[in-house]
Image (cartoon, rainbow, N blue to C red):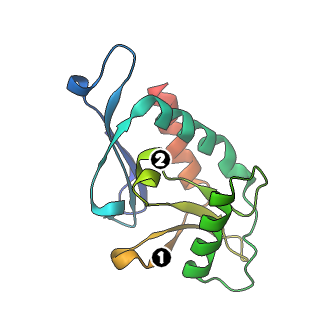
Amino acid sequence: MIYGDPDAFAILWDEVEGWSTQTFRNGLIGLMCGGSLIGNRLFKATLGPELLRLSHVANSTAHLSPAAASTWDAAAVYALALQQHHEETDEFKGSLLLSPWALDDAGFFVFLAVDDNGLERLVFPGGGGTPEDMVVAPGSVGNVVRSMVERLS
C-alpha cells in the first residue's frame, strides 16, 4: 500500500503474511521523496515497531521550529540533524527524524526540517549520497503519517 503522493512524500508499506507470525507482523517498508525511492529499494522490517515509531512522528510534526541555520544548505542541515540524532537527546533542535528503523539501520536517514522562512523541507540522502532537500506543503508529511497510522492501528 502507498500512503501519500510518491512525487512529494509517500510511505510504502507491505505486510508479507508468509514472513509474519501471530506475534510479529513482518514485511517491507520504504519512503519516497520527490519521486525517488530512498535507498533505491524497499527494506525488510518488523512492522509493529515501525508503526509505533511513525505514530510518534505523527504526533511531533506540529512542533517543528526553524532549524538553526541562517541560510538554507541541505548538506549542512542534514549533517547537523544527523549529529543531533546520534546524540540521542530528547531536546528538540529543529529537525525531526522521519525514517523508519529499517532505513536507519541501512544508513538512510530522512529528516523533516523547517527553514528560516518557515517552509517545511524534507532532507534526505540523494543520488550518490549527497544530501538533497525539497519543500513540501505545510503539514503534508504529518498528514500522510497520521492517515497511515490511523488506518493501520
Residue identified by numbered label 1:
131
Q: Secondary structure at mark 1?
A: strand
Q: Is residue 7 above or below residue 116?
A: above
Horizontally, is 146 left or right of 67 in the view? left
**What residue is shown at x 39% (from left), y 73% (from top)?**
126
Q: Nearer the viewer, residue 8 or 18?
A: 18
Say which quarter of the image contains residue 83: bottom right
Residue identified by numbered label 2:
100
Q: Is residue 120 above or below residue 75?
A: above
Horizontally, is 69 left or right of 43 in the view? right
Say which quarter of the image contains residue 19: top left
| Residue 96 in sight from this viewpoint | yes
In the orientation shown, which residue stands out farthest toward the left? 18
Image quarter in which the N terminus is found: top left
Disc 2 crowd rating (10 Å Cα; few below 14, some 14-19, many 20+) is: many
**What residue is shown at x 39% (from left), y 16% (from top)?**
23
Disc 1 crowd rating (10 Å Cα; few below 14, some 14-19, many 20+) is: some
| Residue 37 in sight from this viewpoint | no
**What residue is shown at x 76% (from left), y 74% (from top)?**
68
- Percent x, y for residue 11? 40, 48
Type of residue at label 1? Pro
